[in-house]
Amino acid sequence: MRMAITDEQHTCTNCGTAYIGRFCPQCGVLAHKTHTTAKSVAKEFLEIWGLGSQVVFRTIFELFWRPGYMMRDYLNGHQSRYYSPFKLIIFATLIFAIIAALRNAAPTAEGAFIYGDVFQRYGDTPWVISLFARIDAILLWLHMHPAYSAIASGIFYIVAAWLVFRRRMNFIEVLFSQLYITSQMQIVGALWMLITGSEAYYNVPPFAVPILIGVPLLCYDYAQLYGLRLWASLWRTVLTFVLTLVLMFAVGALPIFLVKLF
């Protein structure tokens, strides 16, 4: 219910401006601002992140019902209808991390990719040991936190997707669409862990989603987003995965190459 506008004069408690109306014309503070409570702080938090509107629910719904068309709408200038991809990926990742912690679905350190043999072959100098020890620590942390690992490795996937679809979209457009897709995969991965209690073993790199779910979903995304037939979408999806793995192995081999070079 809207509050009626009166002729009552107010003095802003924030900047001291005298005004008539519901909001200060200088800083926008509400005239009848109540005391700060847990409820008011929570409400303000939701308003800042846009979680109090129907935009979030519409975006998540369309992210699975008509994902490619929704991304095209966003890229074509209808941003106000949808939740920001940057905000969505933050919350999707937090949800994934919380569910992984509650379900104790974090992987063990045994499967982490480390440079153990490099220490023996090239570890005769202190800087080599220090370099690979830091890299090992980062890789181990990412391996133990799949929600954030998906974002880190998703950088390679974004570059690979741009290489595959560069004739249809520029890099920024691919970036925004892939942020939505990564959020979509984070939500699916969180639901999978919530139901099964563990992360999918045969997943789709770099996402923690089962292959039998992730591949069809990505094909569905790309078919709508780029106007492709399902077969054309399938082989481009597979090519994107292959390029992602190639880029990841190339970057992983770069420290070893630098050690050999210097």
Image (cartoon, helix red, strand yellow):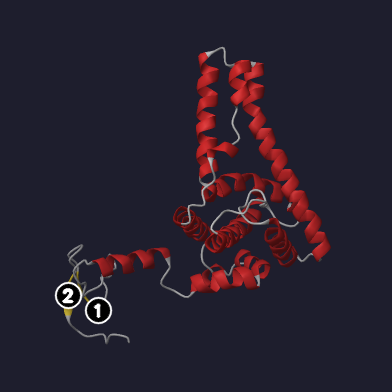
- Secondary element at tag 1: loop
Residue at figure coordinates x 17%, y 66% from the top left: 13
Q: Residues within 10 Å of mark 2 (few under 14, many from 20)?
A: some
Q: Position of residue 174 (x, y in %)?
A: 66, 55
Count how many numbered circles sit on residues in the image: 2
Q: What residue does disc 2 label?
A: 10
Mark 2 and mark 1 in contact? Answer it, CB < 8 Å. yes
Please state which amino acid type lies under the numbered disc 2. His
- Secondary element at tag 2: strand
Between discs 2 and 1, the one toward the N terminus: 2
Cα distance, mark 2 to mark 1? 8 Å
Name the residue nearer the viewer: 85 or 198. 198
Quarter of the figure that contains the C terminus: top right
Name the residue nearer the viewer: 160 or 76. 160
Q: What residue does disc 1 label?
A: 21
Quarter of the figure that contains the N terminus: bottom left
Q: Where is residue 83 in the image (x, y as percent from the top left)?
A: 51, 66
Residue 178 vertical placement versus 22 (above, below): above
Please state which amino acid type lies under the numbered disc 1. Gly
